[in-house]
Amino acid sequence: VTRVAILDYPDYRPFDLEEATAAELGMRLSIVSIESFRQQPFAVDVRLNAGGWPLTGELLLASSCRWAVGYGIGMDWCGRDDARAHNVTVVNMPLANAPDVALHALALMLGTVRKLPFFDAQVRGGDFSSVAGMPLLRLEGRTLGLLGFGNIPRRLAQLARPLGLEILAFDPGVEPETIRDHGVTPVGSLTALLSRSHILSVHVPSTPTTQRLLDEKAIGLLPIGATLILTSRGEVYDPRAVAEALRRGHLAAAGIDVFDPEPPGLSHLLLHAPNTILTPHVAGWSVESVVSMHLTAAAVLRAIAAGDPLPPDARAYLP
Ligand SMILES: NC(=O)c1ccc[n+]([C@@H]2O[C@H](COP(=O)([O-])OP(=O)(O)OC[C@H]3O[C@@H](n4cnc5c(N)ncnc54)[C@H](O)[C@@H]3O)[C@@H](O)[C@H]2O)c1
């Protein structure tokens, strides 16, 4: 009998579809919290990692499994070496919530540029004057820089084009021709992207080479008064450098959905920096994205049971 464990994530409950599918396929399914799984890992054939919980070598070893399936795009919860060493096929859902993250990045961009939290607080406080919120700048004619040009920034470019922005992208893993095909101008280096971006939206995954990619030096290359939008992973930027740039005014504003660590804790520097919109890693959440993750997880179970190739919405990316 194939044993399946769902590593629970309350935001994605209930897992009725996975339970019904497992029952239909004669699989034995259990749902466990990550805390209890860490304390007492157990062997399964398929692990459905709903929360994208980090699965290190130790946990994989203590709980040998053949398949580990992440609910979403992020691929940072299981390292390549660990997966290879333990012979686990790691699967993600590369398009599950890309439209939602793109929309959230756009929302953060518009909210910060139009200073919505500031004006909202002012009106609620009985102050209807506008001068304290000046200046407000038009987006039209400004430049949006996309760091990384995977699925999410491609959608963001589509959403942002009607706003009259010039859109640039830097991604050494994507052919310049492909970037041009999306109506976006490729640039040849990170430095060139940073020095031209009035708004920088960051979409690089968290990997050993992107840790703190946006450090003090990189942020210093942005034009004075730039806006920073962070929706990929907290590890790719230096929170101290971002907070300091906001305080000095080098950054006019930042919209931030991802932190390191998560949750950030009340003393996290970015909770005390000016001109920010902060959201709790919800960029990818929509009813539609959650439904699509459940459907894909159920389809993965069917494919495993039948020995078929994975469904189109799932991709084995490791080892
Ligand atoms: N906030 C959220 O709720 C949420 C939800 C989903 C995904 N994400 C994050 O968004 C990230 C991006 O998603 P995607 O679907 O666009 O990913 P993707 O896998 O389609 O593309 C990632 C791109 O980043 C590029 N890249 C890697 N290192 C780079 C570097 N140093 N400089 C420039 N480009 C680099 C790669 O070449 C690749 O084209 C995911 O990795 C995930 O961590 C966040």
Image: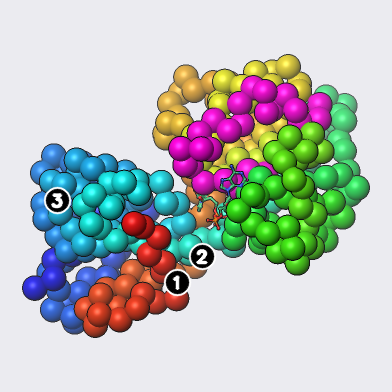
Please tell me which residue is depicted at 79% across the width and 34% down the height of the picture. 195
- Distance (Cα) linking label 1 and label 3: 26 Å
Label 1 is placed on what type of residue?
Asp
Q: Residue 166: image x %, image y %?
A: 84, 51
- Distance (Cα) linking label 2 and label 3: 28 Å
Disc 1 target residue: 313
Q: Which residues are magenta?
A: 200-224
202 drawn magenta: yes
Label 2 sits on a secondary structure element that is: loop
Quarter of the image for the C terminus: give it.
Answer: bottom left
**Which of the two labelled residues, at mark 1 and mark 3, occupies the earlier sequence position?**
3
Disc 3 target residue: 63
Residue 95: mark in rendering: 2
Name which quarter of the figure residue 202 lies in. Answer: top right
210 drawn magenta: yes
Mark 1–mark 2 CB contact (< 8 Å) = yes
Mark 2, mark 3: which one is toward the viewer?
Answer: 3
Label 2 is placed on what type of residue?
Leu
**Which of the two labelled residues, at mark 2 and mark 3, occupies the earlier sequence position?**
3
Residue 53 appears in view: no
Q: Residue 196: image x %, image y %?
A: 82, 38
**Which of the two labelled residues, at mark 1 and mark 2, occupies the earlier sequence position?**
2
Label 1 sits on a secondary structure element that is: loop
CB at disc 2 and ligand 1 closer than 8 Å: yes
Q: How many marks?
A: 3
